Image (cartoon, rainbow, N blue to C red):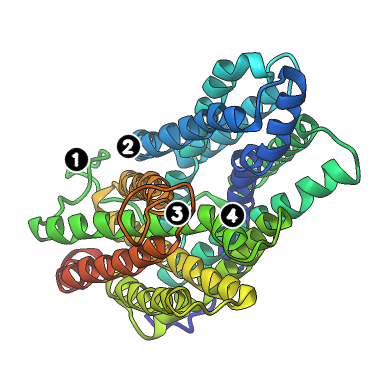
């Protein structure tokens, strides 16, 4: 199909409605993380506990969300193929808004109630796992291939727009509007409720007759769809590992970039906000760039992901050279980090957004999108832990020291990128054959 096929107005409306939903997901999922420094300061003043001790305790809340969000992707992916995805989006947004409202209550969110806060945020993580698989299924069912790519880019934008608003808006509301962190979280909850209402107003008009559905059984009843060929097993396993490597890099680099840059250039606390916004802007650009690269140059999305891994390995090698030769430039470093994270979002677009649509005939688009997305959070858990440990390893004698050494971390970026390249290149030929014999009409 020519890539110049016009995008229908209805498809654009579906794309932007799904974008709004994903924007709402990030607003009610990442807000506590963004406000963490303010939470620590508030709890420290109220309880007298040190900020270091509170950091450890509150990190459990974020970990709980990551676990339930990742595990929930598989569960909700399975359920999402059995019921209407529209209902899951309504329920997921509503539950997320409710947990945010409860988290904002002064009687709930106290230093004595960290266990309760952990339970609430774990429920919030599961609520958000109800959103991504249905979004992918909706795009697969109601959009053509060109429209799917158009929608996938814009839905991905939604997460980054929310990231920018959170990192710029939350500190402004606390510092200049003198709002408490609880009030800010409540505002995010209200935004989630409004988006849920908007979703329920417009989706009945837009999501009526799907363009593509899984094949039915001979008796006309809904079935499990066309069985998958055995040749898909090996490339799928490789794709799982590719996504894990992508998760290691995406979340690991994103979360540790502020610390790396602060240790290296001593830029102060404002750096976390600046770096987060820069990384988000680079990621927004990357979605459109890599979508075009996929449609016009590397039409095999797995091979395209491999090429992005190769580019990342080169960029990471440049960062490593800066460390080795002691080339100090904060601006260049931030740009290079931004490119690395943007590349990971490009790989995310290929392997987590584009790959699932190839399973429309199987009737398991939601399940595969959930499983693939869950792999990201396996990688995220590995990356966050591994990079923290590597940063304390002395390059000289291999023993842990209190001083931070980021060179081993950057070396690992090169290694992980090369591993990602290897698994994608191994999977690409079989994936091409699978798409030709099964996934293409």
- Classify 10 Å Cα crowding around label 1: few (below 14), some (14-19), many (20 and above): few
113 or 47, nearer to the observer: 47
Q: CA distance from mark 1 to mark 4?
A: 42 Å
Residue 10 relative to residue 427: left or right: right
159 or 296, nearer to the observer: 159
Q: CA distance from mark 3 to mark 1?
A: 50 Å
| Percent position of residue 13, x then y | 62, 60
Q: CA distance from mark 4 to mark 3?
A: 17 Å
Q: Quadrant of the N terminus?
A: bottom left
For residue 158, which quarter of the picture? Answer: bottom right
Q: CA distance from mark 3 to mark 2?
A: 28 Å
Q: Which residue is mark 4?
A: 159
Q: Nearest to the eye among marks 4 and 2: give it.
A: 4
Q: Give the residue at x 34% y 72%.
A: 309
Badge 4 marks a residue whose secondary structure is helix
Q: Which residue is mark 3?
A: 252
| Percent position of residue 352, x then y | 38, 57
In contact (CB < 8 Å): disc 2 and disc 1: no
Residue 183 relative to residue 368: left or right: right
Chain-order first, disc 3 or disc 2: 2
| Percent position of residue 300, x then y | 29, 75
434 or 350, nearer to the observer: 350
Q: Give the residue at x 47% y 30%.
A: 64
Q: Which residue is mark 2?
A: 78
Q: Which residue is mark 1?
A: 219
Badge 3 marks a residue whose secondary structure is helix
Q: CA distance from mark 2 to mark 1?
A: 24 Å
Q: Residue furthest left?
A: 230
Badge 1 marks a residue whose secondary structure is loop
- Classify 10 Å Cα crowding around label 2: few (below 14), some (14-19), many (20 and above): many
Chain-order first, disc 3 or disc 1: 1
């Amino acid at each position: 199909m020519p890539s110049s096929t016009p995008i229908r107005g209805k498809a654009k409306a579906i794309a932007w409605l799904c974008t709004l939903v994903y924007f709402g997901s990030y607003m009610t999922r990442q807000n506590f993380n963004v406000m963490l420094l303010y939470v620590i300061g508030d709890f420290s003043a109220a309880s007298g506990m040190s900020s270091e001790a509170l950091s450890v305790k509150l990190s459990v809340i974020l970990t709980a969300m990551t676990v339930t969000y990742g595990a929930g992707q598989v569960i909700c992916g399975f359920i999402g193929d059995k019921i209407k995805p529209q209902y899951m989006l309504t329920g997921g947004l509503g539950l997320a808004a409710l947990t945010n409202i409860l988290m904002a209550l002064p009687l709930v969110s106290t230093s004595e109630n960290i266990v309760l806060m952990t339970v609430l945020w774990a429920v919030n993580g599961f609520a958000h796992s109800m959103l991504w698989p249905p979004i992918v299924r909706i795009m697969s069912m109601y959009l053509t291939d060109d429209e799917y790519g158009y929608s996938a880019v814009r839905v991905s934008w939604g997460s980054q727009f929310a990231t920018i608003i959170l990192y710029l808006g939350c500190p402004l509301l606390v510092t200049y509007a003198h709002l408490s962190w609880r009030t800010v979280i409540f505002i995010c909850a209200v935004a989630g409720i409004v988006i849920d209402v908007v979703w329920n107003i417009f989706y009945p008009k837009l999501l009526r007759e799907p363009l593509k559905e899984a094949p039915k059984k001979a008796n006309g009843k809904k079935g499990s769809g066309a069985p998958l060929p055995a040749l898909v097993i090996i490339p799928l396993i490789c794709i799982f590992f590719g996504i894990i490597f992508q998760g290691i890099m995406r979340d690991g680099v994103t979360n540790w970039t502020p610390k790396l840059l602060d240790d290296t250039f001593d830029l102060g606390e404002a750096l976390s906000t600046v770096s987060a916004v820069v990384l988000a802007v680079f990621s927004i650009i990357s979605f459109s760039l890599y979508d075009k690269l996929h449609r016009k140059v590397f039409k095999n999305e797995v091979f395209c992901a491999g090429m992005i891994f190769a580019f990342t390995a080169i960029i990471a090698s440049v960062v490593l050279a800066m460390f080795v030769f002691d080339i100090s430039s904060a601006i260049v470093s931030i740009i290079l980090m931004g490119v690395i994270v943007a590349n990971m979002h490009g790989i995310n677009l290929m392997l987590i957004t584009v790959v699932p649509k190839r399973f429309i005939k199987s009737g398991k688009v939601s399940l595969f999108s959930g499983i693939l997305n869950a792999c990201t959070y396996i990688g995220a858990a590995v990356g966050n832990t591994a990079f923290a440990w590597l940063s304390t390893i002395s390059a000289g004698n291999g023993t842990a020291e209190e001083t931070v050494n980021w060179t081993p971390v950057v070396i690992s970026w090169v290694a992980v990128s090369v591993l990602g390249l290897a698994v994608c290149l191994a999977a690409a030929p079989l994936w091409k054959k699978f798409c030709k014999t099964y996934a293409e009409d």
